[in-house]
Image (cartoon, rainbow, N blue to C red):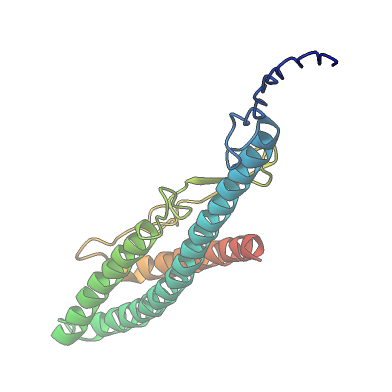
């Protein structure tokens, strides 16, 4: 009878847990350092586009203002021509009768008031062209960047286009319109020529 050697009990194998891979601490939707320059460039382009839109608004306000100023200078020229005709009639009448027609005197006084009213309208139009803190019709300068780095700049200087800036002066009541009418008419025609040049410059920048 043979004896069997008893088998050794099986030793259980140790289970080693497998470590999970570490997660990226940076969220997927958070921009990486390499994408920061692109974000900055996009922001600068947005700023540049806003500046361009603001500049266009400033230029358009100046363009509209000049068109209105030209209208008022034409009205002023018509009044000055009436002054010249009425003052001539006044001088002729004065040489014929001892006292010129009261209606003629009233007309001359009314024309002085109308002239001064036109100058007030011109002042108002020039002041109302303000946009974004810039008024090209009151001598301000518009500065505009043409690239996102701000190295390419354009500076456009305005002109003072109120009555004084255009060389137009009010008339005092009782002014002798015989010599004054020609001076007023010449000043208004010169102002209209200046405005025409300004309009061409602004139109070129708006194009």
Picture quadrant of residue 41: top right
Q: Quadrant of residue 85?
A: bottom left
> If the image is split into quadrants, where does the N terminus sit?
top right
Q: Tell me what residue is drawn at x 72 percent, y 20 percent.
A: 10
Q: How many marks?
A: 0
Q: Position of residue 55 (x, y in %)?
A: 54, 54
For the C terminus, give its image quadrant: bottom right
Residue sitting at the far front: 1
Question: Nearest the camera: 104 or 109?
Answer: 109
| Residue 105 x, y percent position in the rendering | 19, 79
Residue 59 screen position, x and y as percent: 53, 60
Q: Is residue 32 left or right of residue 164?
A: right
Q: Position of residue 103 (x, y in %)?
A: 17, 86
Above or below 143: residue 105: below
- Relative to 67, 95 lies left or right: left
Name the residue located 16 percent from the left edge and 81 percent from the top edge: 98
Q: Residue at x 51, y 66 (%)?
A: 63
Q: Is residue 149 above or below residue 60?
A: above
Residue in the image at 57% along x and 36% along y: 27
């Amino acid at each position: 009878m043979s004896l069997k050697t008893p088998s050794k009990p099986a030793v259980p194998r140790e289970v080693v847990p497998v470590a999970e891979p570490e997660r990226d601490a940076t969220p997927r939707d958070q921009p990486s350092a390499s994408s920061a320059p692109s974000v900055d460039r996009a922001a600068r382009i947005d700023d540049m586009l806003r500046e361009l839109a603001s500049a266009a608004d400033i230029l358009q306000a100046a363009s509209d203002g000049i068109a209105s100023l030209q209208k008022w200078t034409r009205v002023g020229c018509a009044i000055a021509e009436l002054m010249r005709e009425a003052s001539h009639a006044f001088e002729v009448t004065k040489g014929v009768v001892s006292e010129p027609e009261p209606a003629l005197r009233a007309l001359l006084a009314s024309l002085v008031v109308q002239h001064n009213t036109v100058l007030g309208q011109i002042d108002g139009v020039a002041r109302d062209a303000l946009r974004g803190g810039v008024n090209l019709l009151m001598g301000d300068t518009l500065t505009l960047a043409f690239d996102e780095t701000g190295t390419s700049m354009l500076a456009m200087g305005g002109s003072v286009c109120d009555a004084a800036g255009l060389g137009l002066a009010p008339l005092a009541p009782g002014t002798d319109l015989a010599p004054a009418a020609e001076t007023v008419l010449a000043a208004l025609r010169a102002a209209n020529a200046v405005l025409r040049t300004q309009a061409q410059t602004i139109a070129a920048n708006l194009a």
